[in-house]
Amino acid sequence: QVGLVESGGGLVQAGGSLRLSCEASGNIFSINALGWYRQAPGKQRELVATITNAGTTNYANSVKGRFTISRSNAATTVYLQMNSLKPEDTAVYYCNAEYYSDVSTFEQSWGQGTQVTVSS
């Protein structure tokens, strides 16, 4: 199993910025994609942004132009730069990794979540 350690959440005023980080470690043969999801109180978990091993990115419409996902050269750390934050961005943000633990075993791991609170 792969462990994901997130950091960077916190409290920020509307219009401010935060940067989330997530480092993957463990039994990794290759990483297929890394991503960020979020879950607000009373709502379902939703995709925020993903980045594939090839560097292809995908964003939720609600964050396009404000959030940027990137990864380290080793592709085991993923970042989420969040600018122009809005109160509706308040949620627990979860890191996700899709990876192969060996040549044929596809797995998925989730981080423990980090709280992002945007005050108006």
Image: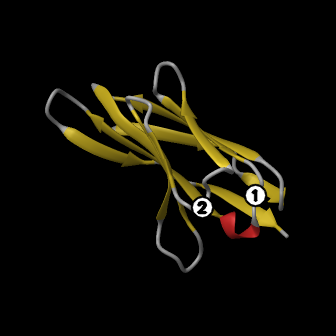
Q: Left of 7 or right of it: where is 118?
A: right
The answer to which of marks 2 and 1 sits earlier in the sequence is 1
Q: What is the C-alpha distance between the residues marked 2 and 1?
A: 14 Å
Task: Name the residue: 64% across, 48% down.
Answer: 67
- Please say whether residue 61 is visible from this viewpoint: yes
x, y (%) of residue 88?
69, 70
Is 98 located above or below residue 59 in the figure?
above
Q: Colour scheme in the image?
A: secondary structure
x, y (%) of residue 17?
78, 48
Q: Amino acid at mark 2?
A: Val
Q: Residues within 10 Å of mark 2 (few under 14, many from 20)?
A: some
Task: Name the residue: 43% across, 36% down.
Answer: 56
Q: On the image, numbered disc 2 is attached to which residue?
A: 92
The C terminus lies in which quarter of the figure? bottom right
- Please say whether residue 28 is visible from this viewpoint: no
Task: Name the residue: 30% across, 27% down.
Answer: 30
Outermost residue toward the bottom in this view: 42
Instruction: Tell me the tag on residue 62.
Output: none
Disc tally is 2
Outermost residue toward the top in this view: 73
Is 78 located above or below residue 111 in the figure?
above
Is 62 located above or below residue 67 in the figure?
below
Q: Amino acid at mark 1?
A: Leu
- To which quarter of the image does residue 68 belong? top right
SS for dot 2: strand
Q: On the image, numbered disc 1 is attached to which residue?
A: 85
Task: Name the residue: 46% across, 28% down.
Answer: 76
Q: Nearer the viewer, mark 2 or mark 1?
A: 1
- To which quarter of the image does residue 70 belong? top right
Q: Residues within 10 Å of mark 1 (few under 14, many from 20)?
A: many
Q: Nearer the viewer, residue 12 or 55?
A: 55
